[in-house]
Image (tube, grey):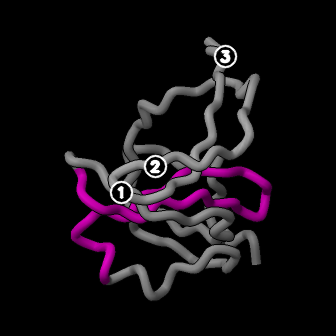
């Protein structure tokens, strides 16, 4: 079965005709002023390789019913973009704090990252 699917490690940004089978190991909604509300996912393929995926604002209502954390899905015909995320090592994590923000209690964790470059 694995031979019918591309591996995450094989993905390249110049091509759109990919077919991967992955497990959604983490799923969350995110809001930014630039991109609006998106669905963010951490995906894991059968080889153990991981990749981050984003469902853009205009497609959230279409794809949301089909995306559940812990379930496997097949994704095909998609594009890749170069990530500008900061890559580092977490060296310290605080305990969960309850802080009052915008009129409600919110959980917060502070992290210290070490640059890996």
Query: As drawn, which residue projects farthest toward the bottom?
Result: 65
Q: SS for tag 1?
A: loop
Q: Is residue 17 visible?
A: no
Mark 1 surroundings: few (<14), some (14-19) or many (≥20) residues within 10 A? few
Viewer-nearest of discs 3 and 2:
2
Position of residue 36 measured from the top left corner of the image (x, y, whole percent) = 24, 57
Segment tinted magenta in the rendering? 35-61
User: Quick one: quadrant of the N terminus?
Assistant: bottom right
Res 99 visible: yes
Residue 6 position within the rendered picture, expressed as x and y whole percent measured from the top left: 62, 61
Cβ–Cβ under 8 Å for marks 2 and 1: yes
Mark 1 highlights which residue? Answer: 103
Dot 3: element: strand
Question: Do the residues under discs 1 and 3 have CB atoms within 8 angstroms?
Answer: no
Q: Is residue 104 left or right of residue 57?
A: right
Q: Which residue is mark 2?
A: 100
* Residue 39 rendering spot, x and y as whole percentages: 42, 65
Give the labeled residue for mark 3. Answer: 114
């Amino acid at each position: 079965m694995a031979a019918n699917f591309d591996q995450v490690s094989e993905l390249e940004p110049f091509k759109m005709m990919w077919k991967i089978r992955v497990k959604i190991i983490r799923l969350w909604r995110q809001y930014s002023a630039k991109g609006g509300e998106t669905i963010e996912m951490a995906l894991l393929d059968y080889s153990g390789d991981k990749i981050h995926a984003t469902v853009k604002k205009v497609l959230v209502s279409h794809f949301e019913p089909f995306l559940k954390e812990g379930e496997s899905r097949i994704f095909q015909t998609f594009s890749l973009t170069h990530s500008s995320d900061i890559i580092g090592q977490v060296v310290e994590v605080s305990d969960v704090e309850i802080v009052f923000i915008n009129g409600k209690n919110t959980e917060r964790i502070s992290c210290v990252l070490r640059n890996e470059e």
